[in-house]
Amino acid sequence: MTRHWRQAGTWHGYSLDQAFCDVLIIGGGFAGLLAARAAARQSMRTLVVSKGFAGADGVSAFAGGVVLYLLPEDDREAFQIEHSRLSEGLSHPEAVRRVAEANMQLLGELTDAGAPVERTPEGRPRRRWLPAAGRRYVPRLGFPSTELARFLRQEALRAGARVLDQTIITRLQRTPNGGFWAVGFRRQEGMLVAIRAKAVVLAAGGCSWRGAHMGQHNVLGEGLALGLDAGARFLGMEFCTSYLATCSLFDTHGQDVLAALGGRLRNRVGEDILERHGIEHPAPPHLTAFAMLTELRAGRGPIHFDLRGVPPAAREDWETQFHLVARGLHRTGVDIFEHPVVWLPGFTGSIAGGGGVRTLDLAGTTEVPGLFAAGDAAARLALVGAGSGITFLNVAWALVSGHWAGLAAARHAAGEELSATGVDELLRGLLETTVRPLCEPAPAQTGTLDQLLRHTQMLAVDPERNFFRTPERLQEADAQLDACWERLHSTTVNDWHNLGRWYELRAMMLATRAMFHSALARQETRGWHRRLDYPERDPALEKVWLVAEPTSDPSGERLPDFTVWPVELDEPEAFRATACEEGAA
């Protein structure tokens, strides 16, 4: 491979920016930046490609401001027991232990390097204990999420990584002679991009179906689609039907912490909806969502969040730790701590659920040689099972999985030799596929894209279809996806911005199809997955994960079906709770 990392050219009249690297990181959030930092520190030529601005876009910059911080003196066994109960039998105990331990070590290293975390007057990290997300006491470390994201970008740059911002990757394929071609475009410049890499880390987030929370507007599953294009499989997609309580005045979350401080969700007659359904405080997110959606379904809405029971000191502490959310709420002109306001179940898809690209170990290894996945792009069943890790555990996973995936990718790249034989033809095909929907002289079809977005969202977000699930409703919604896919592939766009939207819709439809087919295959109710025809947990499905694989080329003009099959999580070929440690590359 050439030692020149970047060169300009043209292809069929389009400007073409070609880049060459050892490790390509797709995604610029916590996971992607930690992966870049780790790979670059192994003397690998590392490139981060971010759809927006690495360190400022996606969910990481609005990640809730708390992260799990267990120390050796803590009662880890009690934490494991409680966590196993809330993951409803599908988490991997050794994986949880490894992530918690590695997160403690990584946070210590980042703190020593100057990471902006909450500190004591003596300068040590300050831990807080608080019931949250169904857990009685969670040791957590607070941080300003936007500042930490910027810090991690600088850490990656200091390690030697390079960054391409405002760059959308649309196609990813492993070449017959090793390594990958990643193809996309820079929408602001109207320029094609082609990147040759020895190893790739998918860290572009999950799929929220353009969820109702800060940072999720652009999280539509592109990383998942790229994984499929490259030959990877999905895992746990039936659990991608998550909802988090959100304020109707401002698109935010943080309800779990506020509920633990004394907040109560009440129906229109003033009843505590958790107590009404026999759910203890604090409730895990999937049970809170169940209570909210059930009350709304029964006509007992709207749901108000009553925060008048939150002590003043606790309120002040919350406003300090979640200052971005507090600032946004303050701008509404309503004091929600004095005046209960309507709260809604906001759909978050795989962000609070655990589905994503299947990995075979904690290093993010996929079934495609040289392809790794981290953060929300990777399935998190080993960590959160059928439940949720919002927010403290998901942040820990983003940091640790990114670090491990970066090390593993560097190790793979160190042993990979690339040949240019046959590459030009493959690249030409990927470029042609990327620009196929683009017809710049054509009339704008933005209305069609808007309609397809709303239609696909309704199929996934409508609780009657996708939370209170039945085979008939799932099959009816699934059938509509085929028409959406066909309409998308008959739609052309006339600018680069809408080309990005076209690929967002493609990714979202693939994720929706995989979710529906996985939901049909799991015949029970567990965690986020709820089947009205199978209302109980099935003991035979304890410790069973579901893998989903497309039956045809996901880049074709026909939306592929997914074959879904079970794997026993305790089987070594299903998952290994091992990771790539520092110095292994």
Image: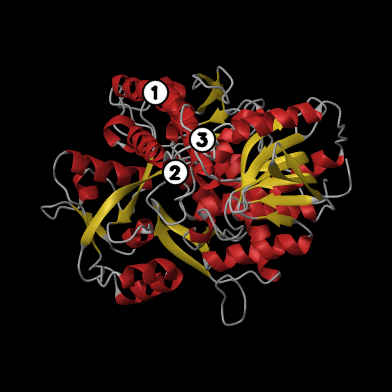
Residue 511 shows in this picture = yes
Q: For the view shown, which residue lies furthest in the bottom direction?
A: 121
Q: Which residue is drawn at 52% across and 27% down?
A: 545
Instruction: Looking at the picture, tell me which residue is in the foreground, 455 or 524.
Output: 455
Residue to which mark 1 is pinned: 483
Answer yes or no: do the residues labelled 3 and 1 have beta carbons within 8 Å? no
Residue 527 rendering spot, x and y as whole percentages: 39, 36
Residue 240 rendering spot, x and y as whole percentages: 44, 37
Rendered-image quadrant of the N terminus:
top right
Q: How crowded is mark 3: few (under 14 residues within 10 Å), some or many (20 or more)?
A: many
Residue to which mark 3 is pinned: 507
Secondary structure of residue under mark 1: helix
Of circles 2 and 3, the one toward us is 3
Residue 393 rendering spot, x and y as whole percentages: 52, 52
- Three-letter amino acid code at the position of disc 2: Ser
Residue to which mark 2 is pinned: 208
